[in-house]
Image (tube, rainbow, N blue to C red):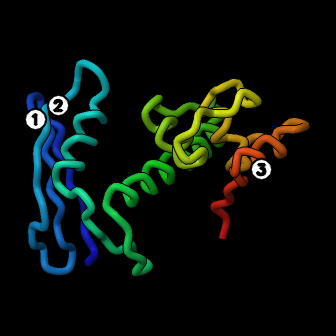
Amino acid sequence: MNVAVCVDVGSTYTKVAVVDLAGGALVAAAAAPTTVGTDVLHGVDAAVAAAAPGRLVRTRHGDAMTLTDFLVTRVVEVGVHGLDLAEALGRPPWLTPTAARVVADLLTDGRPVPAAFGGDPLTLIRKATGRAPLAAGERDVLVAGGLRRLSFAA
């Protein structure tokens, strides 16, 4: 099933609808309090989690994965390509703290960012994805931590 996750961040509630793209049927829906006072993504995350715990979706390539895992891939995609865009525009690289944590957690399997990268998720992400050069010894730290450099090139 090919689905779209539609999100409406309102002033009181964040609503999520999971829609089957083939027929337009509503697959799941949920709402959670909007978290404007902290980070609006917390409310989005809560609404998505409530809408589809363990829900399987198919990627455009036909692979099945949980909706939660699929959404992580979207954060990675937007995050690393946002770094590329910042570079192309001559801007300092940045990610929201939440996006940086999601990508870093994927790279480290939820472990803390290695001290060799200053404990900084953005530094780890830039270096592990080839967007910044690895300093002497950092490749060994990646390997020792079970990490490998990611390449999003075809």
Q: Residue at x 49, y 36 (%)?
A: 101
> Does residue 44 appear left or right of residue 26 in this picture?
right
> Does residue 76 appear left or right of residue 36 in this picture?
right
Q: Residues within 10 Å of mark 1 (few under 14, many from 20)?
A: some
Position in image of residue 126 (x %, y %): 67, 40
Numbered disc 1: secondary structure: strand
Q: Which residue is mark 1?
A: 13
Q: Which residue is mark 2?
A: 34
> Does residue 27 appear left or right of residue 66 in this picture?
left
Q: Nearer the viewer, residue 65 or 59?
A: 65
Q: Which residue is mark 3?
A: 143
Position in image of residue 151 (x %, y %): 68, 59
Position in image of residue 30 (x %, y %): 11, 49
| N-term-proximal mark, 1 vs 3 | 1
The mark closer to the camera, 1 or 3, is: 3
Numbered disc 2: secondary structure: loop
